Amino acid sequence: MENQTQEKNINIAKYISIFLSFIPILFIYFLYKEITLTGFRDGYKTEYEILVKFVDIANIIISSFFAISLINKSMKIKTSEDILYIVKVLFIFLITFIIIRQLGDIYLIDFLKLDTGHGG
């Protein structure tokens, strides 16, 4: 009886981990939308918007690797340690994403002194 309950909990955790593994795919989708919707209505793009695409593309590539890794691992869950592994990898993904994003902005705005086009 206890074994069946534990197996049921692992199955529930497997479905939750599969759901969580699609978070990087959502990041990829929103980054793609951000890249395609840059610029002003007249088609003008600032230097910042042109160069920030490279940061977004780097984040898309990294998000793809994390998504593949998480989906692969979530299909092979057998113990609660595997679930903890998925949560750790997802946390590392989020921190990596934020760090790359912030370092890109710091480099483009502070070091290259690019205008973001927002005035001010």
Image (cartoon, rainbow, N blue to C red):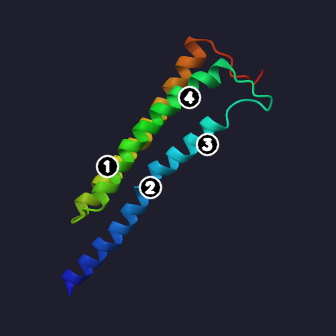
- Pointer 2 local density, CA inside 10 Å: few below 14, some 14–19, many at least 20: some
The residue under the point 67% across, 37% down is 37
Q: CA distance from mark 1 to mark 3?
A: 23 Å
What residue sits right under mark 4 in the picture? 53
Hey, what amino acid is under mark 1? Ser
For the residues labelled 4 and 3, say whether their Cβ atoms are less than 8 Å apart: no
Counting residues from the N terminus, which is met first, the one under dot 4 or under dot 1? 4
Query: Does residue 7 lie above or below 59 as drawn?
Result: below
Hey, what amino acid is under mark 2? Phe
Q: Determine which quarter of the picture holds residue 31.
A: top right
Q: Is residue 88 visible?
A: no
Measured as percent of width and height from the top left, residue 7 is found at 24, 77
Direction from residue 41 to residue 24 in the image, left or right:
left
Disc 4, SS: helix
- Which is in the foreground here, disc 1 or disc 3? 3
What residue sits right under mark 3 in the picture? 33
The residue under the point 52% across, 33% down is 56
Mark identifier at residue 22: 2
Measured as percent of width and height from the top left, residue 50 is found at 61, 23
Disc 3, SS: helix
Counting residues from the N terminus, which is met first, the one under dot 2 or under dot 3? 2
Hey, what amino acid is under mark 4? Lys
Report the number of numbered marks. 4
Image quarter (top left, top right, bottom left or bottom right) of the N terminus: bottom left
Instruction: Name, please, the residue furthest toward the top.
Output: 112
Hey, what amino acid is under mark 3? Lys
Disc 1, SS: helix
Q: CA distance from mark 2 to mark 1?
A: 11 Å
Q: Determine which quarter of the picture holds residue 3.
A: bottom left
The residue under the point 51% across, 24% down is 104
